[in-house]
Image (cartoon, grey):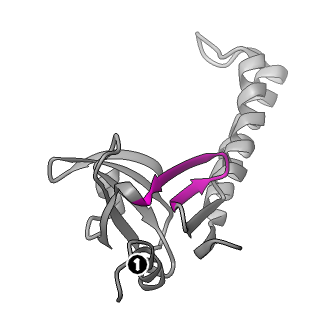
Amino acid sequence: MEGNLYEERIYSRWNIIIMSIVALALLAALIRQLVSGPLGTNPAPDSLLIGMILLFPVIGVNFATLTIRVTIRGISVGYGIIRHHIPWGRVVDCRLDEASALRYGGWGVRMARVGGKRRLVYNIIGAPRLVVEDRLGRYQEFVFSTRKPEAVMKAINEGLGKRS
């Protein structure tokens, strides 16, 4: 953890549960289609159903853990292989997010427009979020969930050279 000002991993079993339910429903549809013949007038090919049955658990595992790192280089937040990094030179400030997760259309990785600014959102069910203002990024604001918003804000302020 050398060079880290803060690190947090948030495990969300809901992502795995939801994706597993979808995969099981697709498996049931595939079995029914193999046993009883095509489903509907325009059935999905068996190969597509098999691909989706394999894909949904992988997506669930990738999105099961949200990792937050505040380092001497900047702020990095990611779901598995999907990550976003903001170097300190672009960070303006951070604050608690007042918007509802429903404002973003749910949980996971989202893009939204709030107050005329583009936001990139990495959020999970049941955790507060922080808004980081990005002066030069594609998104003016980056929002992410954390179980410890005060500790993350303290680390960000430390990274910015501020004293809380």
Amino acid beneath label 1: Met
The percent position of residue 32, horizontal first and vertical second, equals 77, 28
**Depth order, front residue of 22/109:** 109
Q: Helix or strand or loop: what does disc 1 sit on?
A: helix
Q: Is residue 41 left or right of residue 115?
A: right
**Depth order, front residue of 133/20:** 133
Q: Please identify the quarter of the rendering in which residue 12 is found.
A: bottom right
**Depth order, front residue of 112/30:** 112
Residue range in magenta is 74-88
**Residue 21 seen:** no
Q: Is residue 5 above or below residue 54?
A: below
Q: Is residue 15 left or right of residue 102?
A: right
Q: Is residue 104 above or below residue 150?
A: above
Residue depicted at x 68% and y 56%: 16
Residue depicted at x 56% and y 66%: 68
The residue sitting at the bottom extreme is 164
- Which residue is the site of mark 1? 153
* Residue 77 sits inside the magenta stretch: yes
Residue depicted at x 66% and y 48%: 19
The percent position of residue 5, horizontal first and vertical second, equals 56, 77
* Residue 82 sits inside the magenta stretch: yes
